[in-house]
Structures are given as C-alpha cells and as structure tokens.
Amino acid sequence: MRVRICAVGRLRGGPESALITDYLTRFDRTGRALALGPAEIIEVDDRKGGGMAGEAPLLAKAVPDGALLCVLDERGKVMSSPDFANQLGTWRDQGRQDVAFVIGGADGIDPSLRDRADAALSFGKMVWPHMMVRVMLAEQLYRAASILAGSPYHRV
C-alpha cells in the first residue's frame, strides 16, 4: 500500500526535513516486506493566499484517485501507536492500494475536504505546527511498520 503525505507548504532543509527523510526511509525499508510503502511527500503551495478554501483543491488534487483519504485534524480520532499500526494493516488487508494523509496549512483543513475524508486522525488535543505534524506522522508510520513487523523499536 503506497503512502502519500499531502501537505501545505514547502519544507526547507533543516532538522525537520532530516527527521522526515530518516523516518520515511526507515518506513520504506521496514514496510517493504509488509506490503507497506513506499511513502512520498507531496507539497502544495497556495500562492494566491486563499487560505483553507484555496488550499483544499490543491490538496485534493494531490490525493491519488481511489486513495483512502485520512486528514490530520484536531477533531480526529486519537489513537495509540499499536491502534494506528492495526489501522494501517487493516487498510492494507482490505486491498487499499493507496492511502493519503492530508495535512493542512496554518488554519487547518477546509470543511469541504475534511467532510470527504474516510478517516480523521489527531495527535492529541494540542494544536501542533503543521511542519511538526509531518515529522510526527513520519515517525508514527515507521513505528507502525515496526509494530506490524514485530520489531523491538516500539516498547510498551
């Protein structure tokens, strides 16, 4: 199952970029034997400054046809790492070819796109900068693959 992270904004070099690259590389290596991955990041930029409404069609266009759409949203479901791993495995086992995780800009995700989502995931009640959410999602993808592979990375 291919994984696409569709996100608003351009991530420049720096510690966040290095962490994302590291975790997604680990995810690709660990997930390959599990039919998970590869993972890629698609960045969109609303140069016209339309806010959430302007970002929504750009994000929607970045989602592959037929992909399961999961938005990262503060109103989404809070899951444990093992639950997230099980959810990824379930989507894969249901025959999903693609899953797209959508991360909005500073104002979040437009309701028109959020309402179309198959799933909504939250990293807790706190609001996180969207660039940090990318890092956290990349790490959780790797952790999920590790859990499904029975690797000791995730400790309870």
Image (cartoon, rainbow, N blue to C red):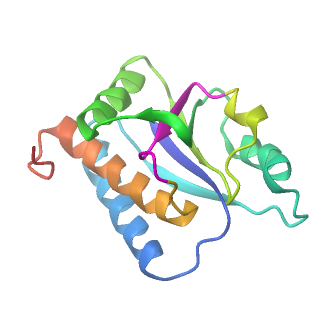
What secondary structure is the magenta-colored segment mainly?
loop
Asked whether, in this view, residue 152 is left or right of residue 103, the answer is: left
Q: Is residue 89 above or below residue 74?
A: above
Q: What stretch is highlighted in magenta?
A: 117-126
Check the image and name the residue furthest to the bottom: 14
**Quadrant of the frame with the N terminus:** top left
Q: In which quarter of the image is the C terminus?
A: top left
Residue 74 percent across, percent down from the top left: 54, 43
The location of residue 77, given as percent across then percent down, is 45, 32
Q: Does the magenta stretch include residue 119?
A: yes
Q: Nearer the viewer, residue 84 or 91?
A: 84
Q: Where is residue 46 in the image (x, y as percent from the top left)?
A: 82, 61
Query: What residue lies at 28% left-to-right and 37% top-to-bottom?
Result: 80
Q: Percent from the top left, x then y, of residue 88?
A: 37, 31
Q: In the picture shown, does residue 48 fall above or below 104?
A: below
Q: Residue at x 67, y 50 (%)?
A: 108
